Image (spheres, grey):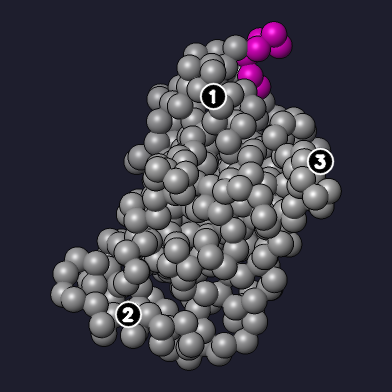
Amino acid sequence: MTKAAAQVAPAPLKPLLQTSASAFETARKVLVNLEGGVPPAPPTPAAEASSGAMRVRVTEHSAGPVNFRTGPGTKNDLVDGTPTLVAGTEVDVLETQRVGGREWMHVRTDDGREGWMVSERSEYVSGIARSHPYVLEDGRDGSGASAVDNALQFVGTRERAKLQSMFDAMPEGPNRDALGALLAQAPESNSDNTGNGYAGLCLSFVQDRFGIKQAADRSPWMYNPANFLDGRNLIVPPPSPNPDGTVPKRDDLPYGQVYSDRTDSAYAAWLALENASADAAAAGGAHPSVARPSMDAEGRPDLTSPLPEGAMLYFGPTGKNAHAGHVAIATGVMAPDGTPLLVTTTWNNGPVRMMSLAEMQAATGPYLGSTTPEGAFQPGRWGGGSAA
């Protein structure tokens, strides 16, 4: 965990920018009713600097060039002198807004002209999104480091004491140092109540930590898995009856053989990512992507491989998790049992917990695999914005 990654709180705005934003807001209120248009929102620090901005290219379309407007929304005027941008034009994205169910991008051309265009007429070129909604006020930017730091704010005193005990017993070395950094992020005064004020289930918990709820296009597969299942491999047929005529219980199925019909669950999110990964590979692409663990001779997963900070781990549905599966976040630290240490909310609105991968599998269900922000999020929507 780097120092920059641990600093999740944004720096205060400079006085000049505060004055500029205030004047901008005054003008915005005057303009808001003109011609039914939607003027742009006040500038943000991320929008002020284009260095390292996400860069996109205007795509081909039967409608021809894309309209280049003075504000987000079709009722805003076209930019004087540059009413359209032709396919192939590359621009820097300064900020985004959602208007009328469509995402609009405030962009700057290479010769300094600024305007707004609809995001569906663009393709990713390079860079990372550094503005709202991809970078939130508390510093969550879609990176693994900011997600873990934010998750630790919900850890109660009991779980913090567990971390302290691990730290005290761990031998000197890089892993102990990394655990010490986690311990420093966990508040000392949190109560041990349910979720410490967080009432979401596991998928909702992960969505919040990575800012997926605030920016649905960051990972559409995790935001609404049902849109990407296409009827494929969500429901595994019930097993055949045993010789004595009884039907095996769902929890008695062989490892990795699961049965679930929950389309809003962590398991559904895993399948959506897996399906999209397979489609991308078939088309010669590499995104999104998931990784399954290596298996031993008995068909059991290897739980001892280190995982990067912010990796998202998925578990199969069983009766232990109401047949919804489970998802947790890797901290980048190895637990005393030799498996990755995870931060997770429990699947029944219970408290935020610190558990090893081995403990997590025993408590919820079979470990299916993992992904990372770079694997699960759309290009340019993973983290790094707050470090700009």
Residue 63 falls within the magenta-colored stretch: yes
Q: Secondary structure at mark 1?
A: helix
Residue bearing the label numbered 3? 36
Q: Quadrant of residue 197?
A: bottom right
Which marked residue is nearer to the observer: mark 1 or mark 2? 2
Marks 1 and 2, the one that precedes in the sequence:
2
Residue bearing the label numbered 1? 280
Q: Badge 2: how crowded within 10 Å, few (<14), some, or many (20+)?
A: some
The residues bearing labels 2 and 3 have C-alpha atoms spaced at a distance of 59 Å
Q: Which mark is residue 166?
A: 2
Which marked residue is nearer to the observer: mark 1 or mark 3? 1
Q: Secondary structure at mark 2?
A: helix
Q: Is residue 311 left or right of residue 280?
A: left
Q: Secondary structure at mark 3?
A: helix
Residue 79, percent across and down? 61, 26
Q: Is residue 125 visible?
A: yes
Residue 223, percent across and down? 66, 47
The residues bearing labels 1 and 3 have C-alpha atoms spaced at a distance of 41 Å
